[in-house]
Structure formats: structure tokens, C-alpha cells
Image: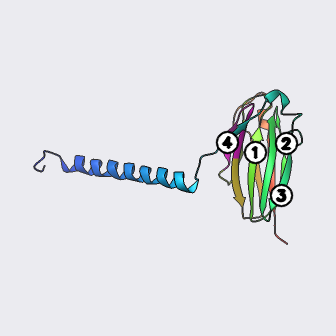
Amino acid sequence: MNGFGVDSCERWWMVASGAILAAFFVAVVIGAFYGFALPGPEKRVDPGRVAVDPPFAEPAVLQRGPGRYDVYMRAQIWAFAPNEIRVPAGSTVTFYITSPDLQHGLLIERTNVNVMVLPGQVSKIAARFDEPGEYRFFCQEYCGLAHHAMFGRVVVEPRP
């Protein structure tokens, strides 16, 4: 005990709590100025028109520049469209995904991609694929009887 009647163990916890708050404040400031953000909704679309209005009417992989790709993807009972995506190693892929029917999810193994997919909401998330190989993706939100059959893959091809 010191002159304030604070036990050394309590003082240690107060210092640790202050350090955690300071780290949180620094993370918020860095996120605000450098654009770090959690994956989340990009925009809203009419779930009844997802299958007929572009860009989700014809899901596709579009090259936006050297090593940059956009994937417009639909998650629907019980499949992803497209369910196979091919990109060269070293590519950054931005996924735009929505659902016309139920709540689904997109989880790509060995990446940071793990988003909830809601009807009418377009979720956006990006991942970089440096290592050639196959990255399987799944629906991680239970969506019905054939939920287990809802999967696909990202094939990362070696650079020529």
C-alpha cells in the first residue's frame, strides 16, 4: 500500500486498463485517417431484382488493373455464383456479394474473408492471394437442408 491506499495489484490493473484504452484510442485514430474498416455493407439492392439487374444478374470476375480483380457474387439457395474463381498469384480480389433469398455467409479458408450475406445488402471485402493453390470457400451461416453443399473455390494460378 502507498499513501493513497491503493494496493500494488490494483495499481497494476489500473495501468493495464489505461494502456488498453490508449491502444484502443490509437487504433480508432489510425482507422479514421488510414481507412481501415471492418467488412460491412457496401450498398443496398432490391433482393427481388438481384437475379435480373446488373451486376449480380451475371456474376463475374472482372480485372480492374494489374493484379486487381472484382468479383460480383450471388449467394443463393444452395450455391454460390460463380462457384469457381481463377486469379493469378499476387492478386488482390475485392468481393461484392449479395443474396436474393436467405441469410448466407462467405468464408474463404486461409484468408481474412468472413462476411455475412443478407438479402438486399451488398457486402464488400478484399483479400490478397500471394500463394498459388486452391482456397475453398463455404457458406458459414446455416441456410437450410442443403447448406452443406454450398461451397466453391478460388484457384490461384502461378504467375507465368
- Residue 114 within the segment the image draws in magenta: yes
- Residue 39 within the segment the image draws in magenta: no
Q: Residue 131: where, in percent of width, then height?
A: 73, 64
Q: What is the three-letter code of the residue carrying label 3?
A: Gln
Determine contact: label 3, label 1, CB under 8 Å. no
Q: Which residue is mark 3?
A: 63
| Image quadrant occupied by the C terminus | bottom right
Q: Residue 138: where, in percent of width, then height?
A: 75, 43
Q: Which residue is mark 2?
A: 55
Residue 81, located in which quarter of the rendered image?
A: top right
- The residue tagged with tag 3: helix, strand or loop? strand
Q: Residue at x 53, y 55 (%)?
A: 33
- Part of the protein shown in magenta: 113-124
Between marks 3 and 1, how big is the CA–CA gap?
14 Å
* Front tag of 4 and 2: 2
Q: Residue 3: where, in percent of width, then height?
A: 10, 49
